[in-house]
Image (cartoon, rainbow, N blue to C red):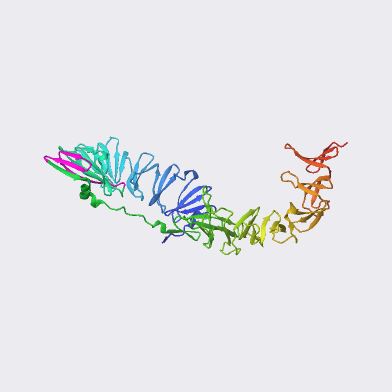
């Protein structure tokens, strides 16, 4: 197992995602796009959001990265191979070579391993490329042949180029020269040639044939091109009949060759057995596992090939590429193992670890069946960043109420009557506020915590987790108003201060919230009259409604509210035949009373 030296964590910041690509590392930032690094942490280049698909081309031993309007070619160790490249072409069917272009028309040829085969120069137009051959046409129309294996041009130049299976026929003053694409050599020269019709080509063991009829000095012969099926780009070229016959015929069974009074017959299978059988072999599997064995270190944690790292403020999560079988493993920034988390995956957006994190702890949602699941369902464990359990319980649900996390566990969560329940309440900093057993639900409010038991009774706790009320209230008999709980009585309400637990008898028959956004105004009914009061929360001030300030006195038969969207929100109070208008501060601004 090869491991690389310290990489300084690839500049990874909270909210970024790192992926081990085998030969390099990719870091994704929602703000700036992608950054690429060598496995040793050397910066290779960056890619903006709009360029993701076309700005990075990884190869076997090197990588192309878009740099503004041009490309640069680097090794995976960060060594610069070539830059200021305007265009890249990979040779069709022969991906081991690539043609690079400069802005001034210069051309170079490199291997995909980053080796320079032909330095940048003005060689003319690249008109064709095959296996180990590139053909250039210069400004005079002459065709030059470049041997990719030997890294040199052939001495001869040619007037015409005709492509065929396995190579080219190149014309010069001496006739047509057959250039073998496999060997990059001139194999033979003829006066003329003729492509045998495709339908006469024959399939044989492990491949197929193509034939050309050759003519020279008044005689003819045959060259066969055998194409083994295990290698789509390979043709084996051999002259199977020398150029010494007067006539050659092809039929369904084979070939007839006429020489003077002699006729010779060749079957396709006999041709294969004599000339090509020894050439057939199965395709070799050259797949290497070397890249998959390279590990890197990120904040003390080992990251293997294909794994993705999600970076958070105080920890990181490492996702195995086989996400349905292996969950994310979570580690602190010093490499301490924290636990496993599943993945949130809706099938549309990128999957993300199912995690809740605070300053003090990390809650990891895991699923015993091994699959993916949604945010609010799973088996949750809560650990501190030193790997210790904060609560020695496993939860199966969590919810957010304002600034609080409520984790709960219910063995029979689908049955409302089940009382085997456990609940833990935390604030956003991760401080534990309250833990309760056999409780139906907890609903944290802004200034207190409401707890409902399985008898549907309400209990009040303060924000430090201390019980405020010594008795529970029937959920059906209470009204929640700001920091108070109002319990219905035969002769009005008893109001409980949720902050102190103090209780007050309120001379109120009914109380309703006034439907004005973000106000603390309430309509109060008492002894067949109504008024408007504002909640102040000051229980020390003497008032007929404790904790409230009078806005409109309780003396009217009905009070209507009207929102004047230009300037005012007004109350219309009715008493007998009289109408009076109040503003929100309780000022009487109009009346019909004489």
Instruction: Report if residue 256 lies within the magenta region.
Output: yes
Q: Looking at the picture, tell me which residue is in the foreground, 170 or 413.
A: 413
Please identify the residue farthest to the left as the structure is shown: 261
Q: Position of residue 411 (x, y in %)?
A: 61, 61
**Residue 365 is one of the magenta-drawn residues:** no
- What's the residue at 45%, 58% (across, down)? 304
Q: Position of residue 237 (x, y in %)?
A: 24, 46
The residue at the point 64 percent across, 61 percent down is 421
The reply to whether residue 268 is visible in this rendering is: yes
Query: Is 87 on the left or on the right of 254, as rendered?
Result: right
Residue 244 against residue 408 in the figure, above or below? above
Task: Provide residue 338's location: percent of width, then percent of height.
Answer: 54, 62
Seen from the viewer's position, the closer of residues 578 and 52 is 578
Quadrant (top left, top right, bottom left, bottom right) of the C terminus: top right
Quarter of the image with the N terminus is bottom left
Q: Which residues are magenta?
A: 232-261
Residue 207 shown left or right of residue 217 in the figure: right
């Amino acid at each position: 197992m090869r491991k690389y030296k310290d990489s300084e964590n690839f500049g990874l910041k909270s909210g970024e995602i790192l992926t081990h690509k085998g030969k390099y590392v990719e870091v994704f930032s929602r703000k700036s796009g992608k950054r690429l690094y060598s496995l040793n942490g050397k910066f290779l280049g960056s890619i903006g959001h709009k360029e993701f698909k076309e700005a990075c081309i990884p190869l076997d031993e090197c990588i192309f990265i878009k740099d503004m309007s041009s490309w640069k070619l680097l090794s995976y160790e960060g060594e610069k191979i070539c830059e200021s490249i305007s265009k890249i072409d990979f040779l069709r069917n022969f991906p081991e070579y690539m043609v690079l272009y400069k802005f001034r028309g210069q051309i170079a040829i490199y291997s995909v391993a980053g080796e320079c085969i032909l330095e940048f120069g003005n060689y003319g137009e690249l008109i064709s490329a095959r296996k180990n051959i590139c053909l250039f046409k210069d400004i005079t129309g002459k065709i030059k042949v470049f041997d990719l294996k030997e890294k040199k041009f052939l001495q001869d130049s040619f007037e015409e180029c005709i492509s065929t299976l396995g190579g080219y026929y190149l014309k010069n003053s001496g006739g047509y020269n057959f250039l073998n694409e496999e060997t990059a050599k001139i194999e033979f020269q003829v006066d003329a040639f003729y492509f045998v019709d495709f339908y006469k080509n024959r399939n044989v063991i492990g491949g197929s044939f193509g034939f050309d009829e050759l003519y020279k000095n008044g005689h003819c012969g045959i060259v066969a091109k055998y194409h083994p099926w295990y290698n789509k780009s390979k043709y084996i070229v051999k002259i199977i009949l020398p150029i010494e016959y007067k006539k050659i015929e092809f039929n369904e069974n084979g070939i007839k060759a006429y020489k003077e009074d002699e006729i010779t017959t060749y079957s396709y299978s006999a041709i294969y057995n004599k000339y090509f059988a020894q050439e057939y072999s199965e395709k070799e599997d050259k797949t290497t596992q070397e890249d998959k064995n390279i590990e890197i270190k990120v904040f003390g944690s080992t990251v293997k090939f294909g794994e993705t790292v999600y970076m958070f403020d105080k920890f990181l999560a490492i996702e195995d590429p086989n996400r349905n079988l292996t969950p994310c493993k979570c580690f602190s920034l010093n490499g301490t193992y924290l636990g496993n988390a599943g993945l949130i995956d809706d099938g549309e957006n990128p999957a993300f670890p199912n995690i809740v994190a605070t300053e003090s702890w990390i809650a990891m949602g895991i699923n015993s069946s091994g699959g993916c699941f949604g945010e609010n369902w799973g088996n949750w464990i809560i650990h501190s960043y030193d790997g210790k359990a904060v609560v020695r319980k496993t939860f199966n649900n969590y919810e957010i109420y304002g600034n609080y996390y409520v984790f709960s566990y219910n063995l029979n969560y689908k049955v409302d009557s089940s009382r085997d329940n456990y609940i833990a309440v935390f604030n956003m900093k991760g401080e534990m506020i309250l833990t309760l057993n056999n409780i139906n639900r907890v609903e944290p409010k802004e200034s207190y915590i409401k707890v409902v038991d399985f008898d549907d009774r309400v209990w009040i706790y303060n924000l430090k987790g201390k019980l405020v009320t010594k008795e529970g209230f029937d959920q059906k008999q209470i009204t929640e108003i700001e920091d108070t709980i109002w319990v219905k009585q035969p002769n009005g309400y008893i109001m409980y201060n949720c902050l102190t637990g103090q209780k007050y008898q309120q001379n109120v028959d009914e109380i309703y919230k006034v439907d004005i956004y973000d106000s603390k105004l309430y309509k109060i009914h008492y002894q067949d009259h109504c008024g408007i009061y504002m909640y102040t929360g000051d229980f020390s001030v003497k008032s007929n409604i404790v904790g409230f300030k009078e806005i409109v006195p309780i003396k009217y038969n009905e009070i209507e509210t009207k929102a004047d969207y230009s300037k005012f929100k007004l109350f219309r109070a009715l008493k007998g035949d009289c109408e009076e208008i109040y503003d929100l501060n309780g000022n009487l601004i109009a009346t019909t009373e004489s």
